Image (spheres, coloured by chain):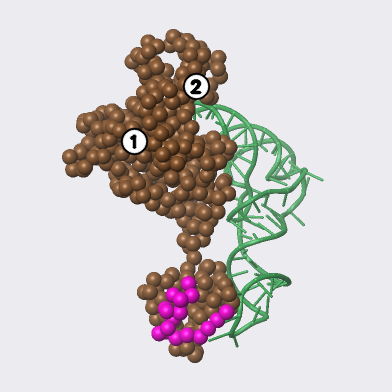
Amino acid sequence: MAQRFQTLPGFRDFYPDDCSARNYVFEKWRSVARRYGFVEYEGPILEPTDLYRRKSGAEIVNQLFCFQDKGERDVSMRPELTPTLARMAAARQRDFRKPLRWFSIGQFFRYEKHQKGRGREFYQFNCDIVGEESILADAELMALAIDLMTALGFSESDFRIRVSDRSAWIDFATRNGIEGEDQTTFLQVIDRMERTPAEKVEEQLSSLGLTLAKVRDFITSGCDASPSLRAILDDLSARGMERFVEVDLGIVRGLAYYTGPVFEIFDIGKGMRAVAGGGRYDQLIELIGGVPMAACGFAMGDMVITDLIRETACPAGLLEKAIIENQRVDAYLILADPDRHREGSAVTQQLRDAGFRVLSSLSATKVPKQFQAAELSGAKFAIVVGSEFPELTIRNLTERSEITSSPAQLVEELRKKS
RNA sequence: GUGGCUGUAGCUCAGUGGUAGAGCCCCGGAUUGUGAUUCCGGUUGUCGCGGGUUCAAGCCCCGUCAGCCACCCCA
């Protein structure tokens, strides 16, 4: 009995439609990044497990796809790109003019339970500016993130970018006598505040010597709490993007390493999922690579954004169009006389050499079947090669009209009409 | 890691403890050089898997696996 195989939990097959959809998202990521002068890079998919332990602590190992290789090295499928970037940037820091504007599109792995918008394997767009302290770098990344969304067809009624400033919270904590490790605990409380009952938050804050009222008061101060936020907002507004921006000091991001402005893109109305997030991490490159360099960046995963595209009318329409366009051919060669197959192959090749996408039936099939196949292939033209060769028929499948032509004129005729 | 729901044809799903079903898709034909529609015919099932109750289980019970959803977490 044949053994039935299926994908491992949390892993996906990409059939052609799915693959077209994935590549459509990749193309948007890539083209917008290039519009901002970013260059593409890539790192290894397998890294030493210690690289991630160094950045995130020992407990991270539970969520890694990690194992021992044949040389008894502890290795992990990469769960994120930032540590790799930090290593690469530090290792050859003298080779590149600053700031680095680097982006990457790659596959990542996390050993955790599969659910909507989250698998054990996913693709992620990473975009970072390294070696630039100016707050305008943060604004540049936020503008890029907004452009990604609009390029996919989202409008201001679909999403917001919520921006905050980690350093404003650190100042706030210090002013209120919270130091050292308590600061990390405090930031975690703020991060989870939205989804924690108020009494519980009050209790957690009071053990740190604070009150909920005081914290809420700080959150409502918005831009006044941070000159950085004011500068970012001013820059985004000069770009005509202020309608997408919302200052929300309640965002702090769970990660310990953020040191300045942080931001998240949220969808509006479809469940308020975060589709992208990032911020400034000025100390991480020194921690991993030993070379101090300022940096900021953000990431967007393929799963949540693709779900959101499919659920939103305008982006979904653009995606559908792209999938069809990606898979259709220009012309379908119909072989009406099997004895002419050499001539048919020559014509097919001639069209392909001219850059047209061309299909033809590989096995002898009745003519009506070939026309049906031509129709389904999305071809605009059917080229009929039969006993009358070198006379050819070019049939326009959308207009249902046809003309006769010859191999010498064929390419020109098709160029004229398409 | 915790909990809820679901699992029947390639897909979407019906199925009252008593012979396994429909629609769609796919393939062939009607139709030997022109696409649609229609009509005819055809393939596809260890009913997720294992055990139990019963004269009899797709249906009830237990377990298990997988999927979806929520929580935890989220680099």
Q: Chain B is drawn in which colour?
A: green
Q: Do the residues labelled 2 and 1 touch (CB within 8 Å)?
A: no
Mark 2 surroundings within 10 Å by alpha-carbon count, few (fewer than 14), some (14 through 19), many (20 or more) = some
Residue at image position (48%, 49%) is A152
Mark 2 and mark 1: span between their CA atoms?
24 Å
Q: Dot 2 lies on which element? A: helix
> Residue A377's spot in the image, x, y percent?
52, 68
Circle 2 residue: A220
Quarter of the view holding residue A43: top left
Whether residue A283 is visible: yes
Q: Earlier in the sequence, mark 2 or mark 1?
A: 1
Q: Of A345 and A275, which appears nearest the observer?
A: A275
Q: What stretch is highlighted in magenta?
A: A401-418
Whether residue A342 is visible: no
The kind of residue tagged 1 is Leu
Q: Chain A is drawn in which colour?
A: brown
Count of numbered badges drawn on the protein:
2
Residue at image position (33%, 32%) is A135
Marking on residue A136: 1
Does the magenta run of residues contain A100? no
